[in-house]
Image (spheres, helix red, strand yellow):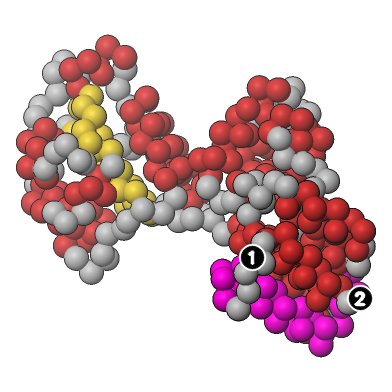
């Protein structure tokens, strides 16, 4: 996982094993920013930074500007640091950097932040950097990986979080680690070290309802609790901005697809691993499987697909509240 790679980079730098170039690329901006910030904050002393630390932005410079800056010698310091932020704006000419990489200035630490893109492994620049520097690809986590990431981040700072609380955060914020981390930092200001972050704390301080959310809707449907499911849908109808139809349909589709897989498992003890679900939540799939036989689950998935198409204007002009009610009737009866 990217977190382990980041820890390795940070540990190496702390030990003094500093590479002349760090090329940070990929879809997840959070880790790129984290590594760049660590280098910016720690490689040089405060006294050295004035003359020896340069921040450039891809939209404002050309590759030649980066090379000329990197070729300079440090002033009254062992090395200089050059950080190029938003380097993805240079994607059309980034290969021109290969001439510098093949003739590096050993007293320069060059950091390239290449967000939302990655280098072609077949080309010269990738191969050249791989020989002398660090190539770090920051990949997006899948939604089902984010709760474990939240747990690890909080554990590293002396906090814990209940499985339901972490699931609420993921449902509300998705897999954007930058957004998730911002909310975690707020919670750390509110909670004492060692305290467990609960759904009640999430509801009070972030504004996510512990009772009216997609996770609770999923549970109500899996338990065939029509009254609770209908109440949640009514809440969604009056709060469409925070509960978009596309997210609800997507999560229900994912849930019932996993219920279908659960039915087909010859060894239910492997369910957590096969489904990619925290063991704490496996009981929800057991309950859904009891209430929805395999044939019914297949019909439910077909109904979800139909409602998804209608929500996009295909074959219907109902509002989202009416579509969700229609979905409930088709799924639960």
- Find numbered disc 1 in the image and state the secondary structure of the residue it sits on: helix
* Residue 144, percent from left and from top: 64, 59
The reply to whether callout 2 and callout 1 are in contact (CB within 8 Å) is: no
In the picture, the disc for residue 190 is none
Task: Pick whichever, 1 or 308, lies toward us.
Answer: 308
**Cα–Cα span, label 2 and label 1:** 22 Å
* Residue 230, percent from left and from top: 85, 58
Q: In this figure, which residue is indicated by the disc labeled 2?
A: 290
Residue pushed farthest bottom? 295
Q: Within 10 angstroms of label 1, few (less than 14), some, or many (20 or more) residues?
A: few
Which quadrant of the figure contains the C terminus? bottom right
Q: Quadrant of residue 68?
A: top left
Residue shown at 31%/58% (left/top)? 118
* Residue 311, percent from left and from top: 61, 68
Task: Pick whichever, 270 or 86, lies toward us.
Answer: 86
Residue shown at 67%/73% (left/top)? 307
Look at discs 2 and 1 and give the one toward the viewer.
Answer: 1
Q: Within 10 angstroms of label 2, few (less than 14), some, or many (20 or more) residues?
A: few
Q: Visible in this render: residue 328?
A: yes
Q: Magenta segment, which residues? A: 287-314
- Find numbered disc 2 in the image and state the secondary structure of the residue it sits on: helix
Q: Quadrant of residue 223?
A: bottom right
Q: Is residue 322 above or below residue 302?
A: above
Q: In this figure, which residue is indicated by the disc labeled 1?
A: 250
Q: Is residue 289 above or below residue 222?
A: below
The verdict on residue 292 being magenta is yes
Residue shown at 11%/43% (left/top)? 62
Q: Earlier in the sequence, mark 2 or mark 1?
A: 1
């Amino acid at each position: 996982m990217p977190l382990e790679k980041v820890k390795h980079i940070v540990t190496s730098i702390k030990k003094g094993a500093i590479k002349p170039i760090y090329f940070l690329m990929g879809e997840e901006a959070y880790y790129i920013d984290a590594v760049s910030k660590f280098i910016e904050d720690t490689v040089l002393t405060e006294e050295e930074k004035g003359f020896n630390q340069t921040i450039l932005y891809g939209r404002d410079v050309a590759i030649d500007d980066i090379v000329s800056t990197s070729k300079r010698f440090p002033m009254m310091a062992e090395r200089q640091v050059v950080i190029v932020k938003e380097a993805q704006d240079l994607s059309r000419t980034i290969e021109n950097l290969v001439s510098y990489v093949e003739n590096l200035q050993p007293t320069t630490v060059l950091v390239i932040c290449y967000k939302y893109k990655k280098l072609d492994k077949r080309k010269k620049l990738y191969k050249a950097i791989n020989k002398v520097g660090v190539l770090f690809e920051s990949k997006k986590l899948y939604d089902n990986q984010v709760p474990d990431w939240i747990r690890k981040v909080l554990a590293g700072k002396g906090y814990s979080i209940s499985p339901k609380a972490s699931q609420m955060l993921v449902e509300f914020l998705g897999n954007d680690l930058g957004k998730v981390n911002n909310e975690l930092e707020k919670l750390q200001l509110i909670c004492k070290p060692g305290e467990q972050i609960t759904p009640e704390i999430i509801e009070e301080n972030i504004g996510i309802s512990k009772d009216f959310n997609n996770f609770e809707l999923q549970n109500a449907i899996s338990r065939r609790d029509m009254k609770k499911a209908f109440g949640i849908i009514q809440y969604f109808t009056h709060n469409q901005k925070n509960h978009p139809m596309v997210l609800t349909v997507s999560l229900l589709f994912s849930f019932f697809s996993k219920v279908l897989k659960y039915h087909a498992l010859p060894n239910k003890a492997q369910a957590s691993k096969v489904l990619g679900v925290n063991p704490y939540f496996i009981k929800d799939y057991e309950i859904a499987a009891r209430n929805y036989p395999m044939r019914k689950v297949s019909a439910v998935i077909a109904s979800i697909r139909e409602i998804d198409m209608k929500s996009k204007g295909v074959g219907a002009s109902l509002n989202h509240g009416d579509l969700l009610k229609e979905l409930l009737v088709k799924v639960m009866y």
